[in-house]
Image (tube, rainbow, N blue to C red):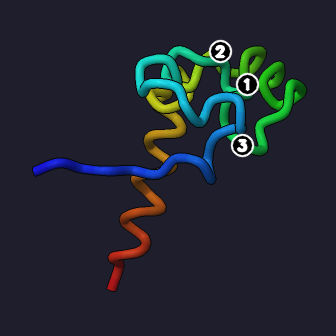
């Protein structure tokens, strides 16, 4: 089954036509709303430089998992 995802709302306009691999290897500023200052702080605090680094960071992954669990809590 083919899967189609529209990423235009989460990417800076310059990155909308790039491949998934290019986006993952892009600086975090490729994400819509992430400024150069944000990128600097992410690098200083967590050594996050790329979209891939951000998505695979254990702290951000744990926070995302907790939010997802809260959505299913009874």
Q: Residues within 10 Å of mark 2 (few under 14, many from 20)?
A: some
Local SS, label 2: loop
- Asked if the residue at tag 1 contacts the one at tag 3, i.e. Cβ–Cβ closer than 8 Å, the answer is no
Q: Earlier in the sequence, mark 3 or mark 1?
A: 3
Mark 1 — residue? 42
| Quadrant of the rendered image containing residue 34 | top right
Report the mark closest to the observer, 1 or 2: 2
Give residue 11's position: percent from left, percent from top. 63, 40
In 3D space, how far apart are the residues under numbered discs 1 and 2 (Cα atoms)?
7 Å
Depth order, front residue of 2/42: 2
Q: Earlier in the sequence, mark 3 or mark 2?
A: 3
Q: Is residue 72 above or below residue 31?
A: below
Residue appearing at x 61%, y 47% in the figure: 10
Mark identifier at residue 5? none
In 3D space, how far apart are the residues under numbered discs 3 and 1 (Cα atoms)?
15 Å
Q: Is residue 56 above or below residue 16?
A: above
- Asked if the residue at tag 2 contacts the one at tag 1, i.e. Cβ–Cβ closer than 8 Å, the answer is yes
Q: Earlier in the sequence, mark 1 or mark 2?
A: 1
Mark 2 — residue? 49
Local SS, label 1: helix
Residue appearing at x 35%, y 78% in the figure: 73
Q: Is residue 68 above or below residue 50?
A: below
Give residue 6's position: percent from left, percent from top. 47, 51
Residue appearing at x 43%, y 71% in the figure: 70
Give residue 29's position: percent from left, percent from top. 73, 28
Residue appearing at x 10%, y 51% in the figure: 1
Give residue 67's position: percent from left, percent from top. 48, 62
In 3D space, how far apart are the residues under numbered discs 3 and 2 (Cα atoms)?
15 Å
Residue that sits furthest to the right in the current view: 37
Mark 3 — residue? 32
Q: Residues within 10 Å of mark 1 (few under 14, many from 20)?
A: some
């Amino acid at each position: 089954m083919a899967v189609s995802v529209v990423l235009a709302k989460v990417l800076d306009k310059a990155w909308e036509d790039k491949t998934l691999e290019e986006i993952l290897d892009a600086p975090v500023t490729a994400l819509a709303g992430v400024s150069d200052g944000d990128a600097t702080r992410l690098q200083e605090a967590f050594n996050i430089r790329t979209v891939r680094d951000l998505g695979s960071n254990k702290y951000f992954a744990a926070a995302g998992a907790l939010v997802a669990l809260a959505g299913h809590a009874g």
